[in-house]
Image (cartoon, grey):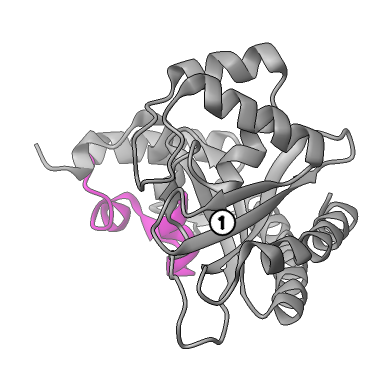
C-alpha cells in the first residue's frame, strides 16, 4: 500500500478539492485519480458526495465535474483572509525597523512554540531560527510568556507534564524554579531568555491578546548577546508591547 493510499479520511475531500483548485477546469474521476493515489471507487464516491452537497456539478457531458459557486465562494473568502496576514506582517516589519533585530510572531502548538511569522534583521551576524520552526516551552521567552498566561493550577499541571531538557548551562530544569520564573513573568508582563535555549542568544517576548484578553501569540525579538546585552533587550519591551497592541486592534 502506498503512502498516499493511507491518507486520513478527513483529509481526502480537501485533497480532492485542491486538485480542482489547481486544475482550473472540469475533471473526470479518472483524471482526479491521476493526481491522488486513492482507489478509483473512493474518488468517484467522494465526487458524487460533493456534487450532492453543491460543491461540484456535472459538466455538459456528465462525465466530468467542475467547481460550483459555493466552492468558489469558499476560495474567495480564504483569499480575503490574506489581508490579516499582510497587516500582521507589516506590523512586524515596523517593530523590526525600530529594534533592528529579528521579530517573531510565535504561537503555541502541541510540540512547542511555533514560529508562524517573522521579519529578519539585516545584521550579517544574527541567530537564525527559520519560520515554521518549533522550539521548547520551558527555555524560550515565547514559551515562558505563553505558560505564564495559564491559570495557576493549569500552569502547574502543564509544567509537571514537560520534559525540562537542559539545552544550555542556563536552562531551568527544576520545576519549582520554573514555576517561580513563570510567576515573575506573569507579574511583569514579559519573558526573558538569557541564553537558556541557545548559547549566546538572548530574547524577550510579550503576549498578544484577543478582545477577550486571551493569549493568542507571543511577539518576540532575539539576537546574539554580544550585540544585545540584557539592558538593551529590556529597552525593546515597550516597542514590542506597542506592536502587540496594534496587532490586537488590527487583526482581531
**Percent coordinates x, y for residue 238 in the rendering:** 84, 61
Residue 10 visible in the snapshot? yes
Is residue 25 inside the magenta stretch?
yes
Q: Residue furthest left?
A: 1
Residue at x 12%, y 42% (from the top left corner)? 2
Query: How dense is the environment of label 1, judged by Cα within 10 Å: few (below 14), some, or many (20 and up)?
Result: some
Residue 12 lies left or right of residue 87; in this view the side is left
- Measured along the vertical axis of the image, is residue 72 above or below residue 52? below
- Using the rendered view, name the quadrant where residue 203 is placed: bottom right
The residue at the point 53 percent across, 86 percent down is: 123
Q: Which span is picked out in magenta?
A: 17-38
Q: Secondary structure at mark 1?
A: strand
**Residue named by callout 1:** 116
- Residue 149, image x, y percentages: 72, 31
Position of residue 107 in the picture relative to residue 22 (left or right): right
User: On screen, 248 above or below 52?
Assistant: below
Q: Is residue 149 visible?
A: no
Quadrant where the image shows the N terminus = top left
User: Residue 97: horizontal and vertical position, in percent?
Assistant: 73, 81
Residue 69 among magenta residues: no
Residue located 88% across and 33% down the image: 212
Amino acid at each position: 500500500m502506498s503512502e498516499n493510499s493511507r491518507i486520513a479520511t478527513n483529509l481526502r475531500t480537501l485533497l480532492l478539492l485542491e486538485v480542482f483548485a489547481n486544475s482550473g477546469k472540469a475533471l473526470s474521476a479518472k483524471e482526479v485519480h491521476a493526481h491522488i493515489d486513492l482507489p478509483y471507487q473512493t474518488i468517484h464516491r467522494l465526487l458524487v458526495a460533493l456534487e450532492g452537497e453543491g460543491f461540484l456539478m456535472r459538466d455538459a457531458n456528465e462525465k466530468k465535474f467542475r467547481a460550483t459557486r459555493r466552492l468558489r465562494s469558499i476560495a474567495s473568502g480564504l483569499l480575503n483572509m490574506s489581508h490579516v496576514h499582510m497587516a500582521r506582517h507589516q506590523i512586524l516589519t515596523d517593530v523590526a525597523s525600530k529594534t533592528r533585530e529579528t521579530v517573531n510572531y510565535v504561537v503555541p502548538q502541541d510540540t512547542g512554540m511555533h514560529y508562524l511569522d517573522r521579519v529578519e534583521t539585516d545584521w550579517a551576524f544574527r541567530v537564525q531560527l527559520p519560520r515554521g520552526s518549533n522550539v521548547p516551552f520551558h527555555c524560550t521567552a515565547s514559551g515562558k510568556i505563553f505558560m505564564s498566561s495559564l491559570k495557576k493550577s493549569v500552569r502547574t499541571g502543564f509544567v509537571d507534564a514537560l520534559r525540562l531538557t537542559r539545552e544550555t548551562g542556563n536552562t531551568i530544569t527544576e520545576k519549582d524554579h520554573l514555576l517561580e520564573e513563570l510567576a515573575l513573568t506573569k507579574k511583569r508582563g514579559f519573558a526573558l531568555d538569557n541564553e537558556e535555549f541557545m548559547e549566546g542568544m538572548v530574547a524577550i517576548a510579550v503576549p498578544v491578546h484577543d478582545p477577550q484578553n486571551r493569549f493568542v501569540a507571543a511577539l518576540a525579538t532575539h539576537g546574539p548577546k554580544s550585540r544585545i546585552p540584557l539592558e538593551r533587550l529590556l529597552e525593546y519591551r515597550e516597542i514590542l508591547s506597542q506592536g502587540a497592541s496594534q496587532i490586537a486592534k488590527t487583526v482581531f
